[in-house]
Image (cartoon, rainbow, N blue to C red):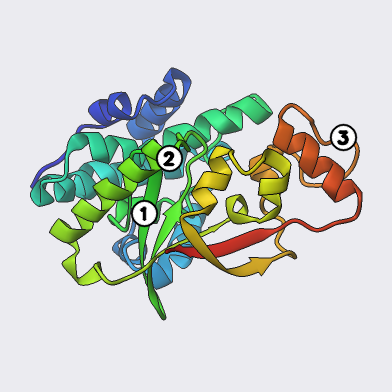
Amino acid sequence: MIKLEHAYLYKLLELPQEVIELLDTYGEERTKKIPEEIYRKLFVREKWDEGVKELQSYLGEDPAGMKILWEQLDILCCYTYGEYVKQGIGEDIFAATMKFCTRFLYEHHAVWGTFKYVWAWWFPRQMTLQEIRFGALEYEFVDGREREVAIHIPSDADMSMDSIQASLAAFYSFRKTYHADWEDVRLTCDTWMLMPELQEFLGKDSRIAGFQKLFQIDQIDREATWYMGWIYPGYDIVDESLPEKTLLQKMLKKYLLDGKKFGIAKGYIK
């Protein structure tokens, strides 16, 4: 069985030194391992939420999320990395995918001034090889009521058309090799970046407008408000305090203060 050392994983993911020290302390003091019943739930999509909540309860007080981060990274070391190797998927792809943790640790620090891991509920996707990153975009194999490949857009994504097309090409090649039974499954995206107002805010020649042209929009939810955390990190109320550091923030703030609703759109690759 192929097993990765924690120290090597931390270096590969370029985790902050402060976080590494906290993880090492927990690892040294750890006296119990995940019960098999909880462990199994982390590998079943329908039981992910239940499994993560049970794990959090089992670990006890964990204000910065370092205990559950260590446990999830341990699964990468003991299981996920070996699966990547067995399938012949490069270590660069593994690292790019798992830097999900690193990115959100730094983003929390940028907003709140502390490192805190709050995305344990999402990470089973990466742990179980159901979400993988190629270049700019992440791709999630969703085997639900209807199969779909859900595209996710990381906050550090290069949204130039060359970058997007390179990512799609890499994914299509990967899918053909490793998931041939998914070749006819359409690629979807559920995001604020597909909202039609963005062409008005940013112009029809903007990178986001170019990204939108790849999709056929079939749903718009103007009651959804989770775009706030992405466009205005640290803010969840629409008022005059919203920042105007970017053109998008400035244009959307005016739009929202005028009493209009923004939202989330879902579409699929044409």
The numbered mark, 2 or 3, whose residue comes first in the sequence reads: 2
C-alpha separation, residue under disc 3 versus residue under disc 1: 35 Å
- For the question of whether residue 204 can be seen, the reply is yes
Left or right: 52 with respect to 81? Answer: right
- For the question of whether residue 114 can be seen, the reply is no
Q: Which mark is residue 139?
A: 1
- Position of residue 43 measured from the top left corner of the image (x, y, whole percent): 31, 63
- Position of residue 130 measured from the top left corner of the image (x, y, whole percent): 31, 58
- Position of residue 181 measured from the top left corner of the image (x, y, whole percent): 20, 71
Q: Residues within 10 Å of mark 1 (few under 14, many from 20)?
A: many
Tell me the residue at 42%/64% (across/down).
270
Above or below: residue 191 compared with residue 28: below
Q: Which residue is mark 2?
A: 161
Left or right: 207 with respect to 237? Answer: left
The numbered mark, 3 or 1, whose residue comes first in the sequence reads: 1
Q: Quadrant of residue 259?
A: bottom right
- Position of residue 254 measured from the top left corner of the image (x, y, whole percent): 86, 42
Identity of the amino acid at label 3? Ser
Question: From the viewer's perspective, is the residue at label 2 or at label 3 nearer?
Answer: 2
Tell me the residue at 44%/22% (across/down).
16
C-alpha separation, residue under disc 2 versus residue under disc 3: 34 Å
Identity of the amino acid at label 2? Met
- Are circles 1 and 2 on residues that touch, CB within 8 Å? no
Q: Which residue is mark 3?
A: 241
Identity of the amino acid at label 1? Tyr
Tell me the residue at 79%/30% (across/down).
244
* Viewer-nearest residue: 113 or 139: 139
Above or below: residue 224 compared with residue 112: below
C-alpha separation, residue under disc 1 versus residue under disc 2: 17 Å
Callout 1 secondary element: strand
Callout 2 secondary element: helix
Tell me the residue at 41%/22% (across/down).
21
